[in-house]
Amino acid sequence: DPYARLLLEALKQSGCTVFNDRHFSCENCDGCVSGGFDAATSQIVLCQNNIRQQSHMNRVVTHELIHAFDHCRAHVDWFKNVKHLACSEIRAANLSGDCTLMNEIARFKFGLKGHHQVKIVD
């Protein structure tokens, strides 16, 4: 995937080289989770039981590599600063392709604009 290659190169240039056998793990996951980034080990987890298409895997890898890049470059405080976490999640969702029109339609989100302006109430 070209996005994954771009992010891997950006990580390397930032001084955070990624090794496939060390920084990627394929596991069975609970629920409908597709993947995650473990900041403690700098490892990307891919949920092999919940990823069924190459395009989905590409989006998950890209999304989690964005978290890895943020972790490396911006030194995100994942556990104590919710603003850091929110910012990285928004970046990853937007830049990975999670928010494409086709993905939004698949989620039954049919509006064509204003999704970022929707206020979430606790």
Image (cartoon, rainbow, N blue to C red):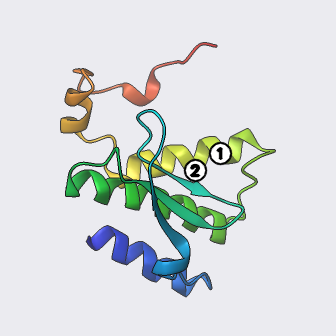
Going 24% across and 20% down the picture, which residue do you hit? 108
Q: Amino acid at mark 2?
A: Ser
Given contact means CB atoms under 8 Å apart, are the residues at marks 2 and 1 in contact? yes
Splitting the image into 4 quarters, where does residue 4 fall?
bottom left
- Which residue is depicted at the point 27% across and 22% down? 109
* Closest to the observer, 119 or 40: 40
Q: Nearer the viewer, residue 105 or 33?
A: 33
Left or right: 85, with 64 as reference point = right
Relative to 57, is 69 above or below?
A: below
> What amino acid type is highlighted by mark number 1?
Leu
Above or below, comparing residue 75 to residue 11 in the picture: above
Q: Quadrant of residue 86?
A: top right
Instruction: Name the residue beneath numbered marker 1.
Output: 85
Badge 2 element? helix
Q: CA distance from mark 2 to mark 1?
A: 5 Å
* Residue 58 vertical placement versus 9 (above, below): above
- The residue wearing badge 2 is 88
Residue 27 in the image: state x and y as whole percent: 46, 56
Q: Position of residue 11 (x, y in %)?
A: 53, 78
User: Could you say where residue 107 lies in the image, as x and y percent from the top left?
Assistant: 27, 26
In the image, taking residue 80 as reference, residue 82 lies left or right, namely left
Q: Nearer the viewer, residue 108 or 48?
A: 48
Left or right relative to 6: residue 117: right
Picture layout, residue 60 above or below residue 101: below
* SS state under label 1: helix
